[in-house]
Amino acid sequence: MARDYYEILGISRNADPDEIKRAYRRLARKYHPDVNKEEGAEEIFKEINRAYEVLSEPETRTRYDRFGEAGVGGAAGAAGFQDFSDMGGFADIFESFFSGFSGGVGQTSRRRGPVRGDDLRLDLKLAFKEAVFGGEKEIKISHLETCSTCSGSGAKPGTRPRTCPTCSGSGQVRRATRTPFGSFTQVSTCPSCSGTGEVIEDRCDTCGGSGQKQESKKLKITVPAGVDNGTRLRVSAEGDAGQRGGPSGDLYVYLFVKEDAVFQRDGINILSKLKISFLQAILGSRLEVKTVDGPVELQIPPGTQPNTVLTLENHGVPRLGNPVSRGDHLITVLVEIPTRIKPEERELLEKLAEIRGDRVGKGGIEGFLGGLFRG
């Protein structure tokens, strides 16, 4: 059995036309398919439309009150539902009812205001030490700047844009469609002015009417100490210029650090390797090693084993944002065992083996040397 139309709209049987209209507005906003995605909302919306279609017309309402659904069976299409999918969505429909919404007749004409310029990205490669210590870098960018000839208006000097005659400066055009229960309005961007509300008759010769011009520019930026791969720097207002007096976008510089032949990085620590002879490992020594700060003397303790890690404190990477605090330089010691030795060297090593009571068996003297670093 069909539901009572008064019940569908939630009104009494003696409701006046204004009450019917208000009830319909409220329910249509709530259940329109562009807004309400819940299951069953579309069917409810169809019922709301059908109820309003019948009750909003005095003659049809009288027949319904006397004979019910049978008295108005042919009053409208079987579904009583309009497909609004090609009319710009919920905000563009029901001009006569939804006048307070976007696209309704109650909306005042508006021009597009200032528009912020686009942000730009630049990838910058740094040498390993540049990332460690930072410093000033010169970069070259290409961005849109406000045309100096027309000051961004796009019009030839001495002239100015005029209000678009197609949309009267609103930047929008409306197409109204009348139906039995109201007017529907589709709102779209004005094709004559592309939504700006203005047209330029005499275009600026410098920028061609765009109000902007592509320019190359050199900038000096400061790279802070301790940056790493993927660090992003923001350079304020160096993106594309805004339109109609809008602010410029920003420039974002993404940093990428080149690999170094000597140093590696682990957080704020620096890693490197040092090759020493077996005699230097046995006897100990003082050697000059490379660091990011330059040559530094390193003490090799006697009896140093292969893969021992020695630490040079405060010779690592400055902590980003706190350059006074630095990491360490960690040096992995690699002991080189000779594969060939001179006869006189062999003789000395065999005497050493004899003093230590070590048997030089099948492994030969090389096995003996290996044993020194295992025991």
Image (cartoon, rainbow, N blue to C red):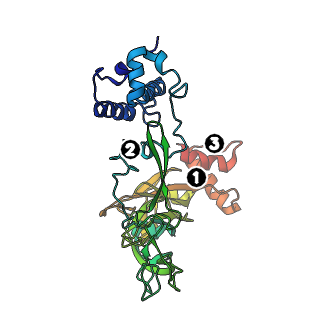
Q: Tell me the quarter of the picture where residue 159 sits.
A: bottom left
Q: Is residue 327 above or below residue 55?
A: below
Q: CA distance from mark 2 to mark 3?
A: 108 Å
As drawn, is 86 to the left or to the right of 49?
Answer: right
Query: Would you say the residues marked 2 and 3 are in contact, meaning their CB atoms lie under 8 Å apart?
Result: no
Q: Which percent across, then down, holds residue 304?
A: 48, 52
- The disc, 1 or 3, on the residue closer to the chain's N-terminal end is 1
Disc 3 marks a residue whose amino acid type is Arg
Q: Secondary structure at mark 3?
A: loop
Q: In the image, what residue occupies the spot 48% across and 51% down?
A: 308
Q: Is residue 355 above or below residue 129?
A: above
The residue tagged 2 is 96
The residue tagged 3 is 359
Q: Nearer the viewer, mark 1 or mark 2?
A: 2
Disc 1 marks a residue whose amino acid type is Leu
Q: Residues within 10 Å of mark 3 (few under 14, many from 20)?
A: some
Disc 2 marks a residue whose amino acid type is Ser
Q: Is residue 110 visible?
A: yes
- The disc, 1 or 2, on the residue closer to the chain's N-terminal end is 2
Q: Nearer the viewer, residue 120 or 30?
A: 30
